[in-house]
Image (spheres, rainbow, N blue to C red):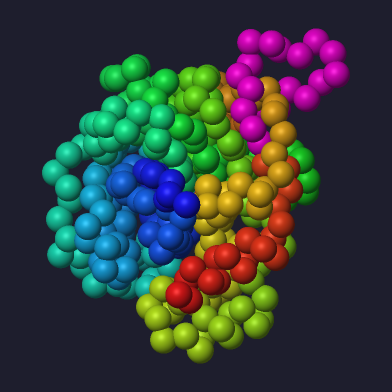
Amino acid sequence: MTAKKIILDCDPGMDDSMAIIMACKSPALKVMAVTTVNGNYPAEVTSVNARKILELLGREDIPAAQGMAAPMVRPAPRDPFTHGADGQAENFLPAPSLPLCGRHAVDLMIDLINENPGEIHLVMTGPMTNLAVALQKAPEIREKIAGITAISGAFGLNRYAFANATGDTPQSEWNVYVDPEAAQIVYQSGIPMTALGLDVATHFDINLSGEQIRALEESTNREAAFLRQAIRFVNQKGFEAYCAVIDCLAVGYVIDPTLVETFAGRVGIETKGELTLGNTVLDARHHHVWEQLPVVEIGRSVDYARFLRLLLELVLA
Ligand code: BDR
Ligand code: CA
């Protein structure tokens, strides 16, 4: 089986860091680049954190490119959640010696997509600013992207969708909330896209079991220690373990699409409301549906036991 080519566009972030680990260690994927964006932290911090992880993994061969420093039309908002003093659950990894690749993330994305038409899957675990800007700068890439899998939105499918809302409005998801205009461009782009919302990505069945946490403790590898510390960090803040691995679900889905059941739904992005800024509004009405809204695939349910087995297998490998 040939490995799927992916670009991992992210804002590490403890769970983005875990997504990088999972992607880089999976033989099913070929990580063409890790691109970073303003999101959980400013782009300078997220790009340092991405390189810390690539170094931890000994994957200095993968280019790391820094991207957009701010959302498209609004200032970077306050994050109600914190990923710690270092943005990596206070793992305090050594400062990276791996340099940035020298290209802006947007340009690197455009080049890689043009050089590999129809082959690149975008795995997006941060705000969608880089891709939205890339689509404006080089509209021809739209036809050449194999697909997008994003941790994006909250669709009201179950109680986790809004109870675990990560944006700073009652029902929004952080990645959309930070840059709703960018999300709107990407959702409307027509590129085949799967949105894994908080409904599935923060479901409590993603919490690792005691046995799985013990396996991390018994391991001598540094990725396992990183995840163990991240779980300790979120637990100390009163959160469940899922917070440390939210973004991993996008990587899991790209490795094995049978892990997630999806359905096609029409979704609009709220860019104006005060209470609803960043909401991903699913038009699931039987009648009078807004036909102008784009259709995306939306995660409905996950085989969590199998997903966690895959995650642990890759982390412990
Ligand atoms: C998203 O918010 C961020 O804090 C996480 O990294 C994840 O990508 C979930 O809403
Ligand atoms: Ca993220």
Q: Residue furthest right?
A: 286
In the depicted structure, whether residue 281 falls above or below residue 149: above
Q: Confirm whether residue 169 shows in the render.
A: no
Q: Residue furthest bottom?
A: 218
Q: Does residue 243 show up magenta in the picture?
A: no
Tell me which corner region of the image, top left, top right, bottom left or bottom right, holds residue 293.
top right
Residue occupying image coordinates x 68% and y 22%: 266
In the depicted structure, whether residue 145 falls above or below residue 96: above
Q: Does residue 289 show up magenta in the picture?
A: yes
**x, y percent for residue 231:** 54, 72
The region drawn magenta spans: 281-298
Using residue 196 as the reference point, say whether residue 283 is left or right of it.
Answer: right
**x, y percent for residue 7:** 37, 43
> Total number of numbered labels?
0
171 or 47: nearer the eye? 47
The kind of secondary structure the magenta stretch mainly shows is loop
Residue occupying image coordinates x 37% and y 73%: 91
83 or 50: nearer the eye? 50
Residue occupying image coordinates x 40% and y 81%: 221
Using residue 310 as the reference point, say whether residue 125 is left or right of it.
Answer: left
**x, y percent for residue 158:** 78, 45
Tell me which corner region of the image, top left, top right, bottom left or bottom right, holds residue 307.
bottom right
Quadrant location of the C terminus in the rendered image = bottom left
Q: Residue furthest front?
A: 1
**x, y percent for residue 102:** 14, 44
Using residue 158 as the reference point, say whether residue 308 is left or right of it.
Answer: left
Q: Confirm whether residue 197 shows in the render.
A: yes
Using residue 33 as the reference point, say whether residue 278 is left or right of it.
Answer: right
Residue occupying image coordinates x 30% and y 70%: 56
309 or 119: nearer the eye? 119
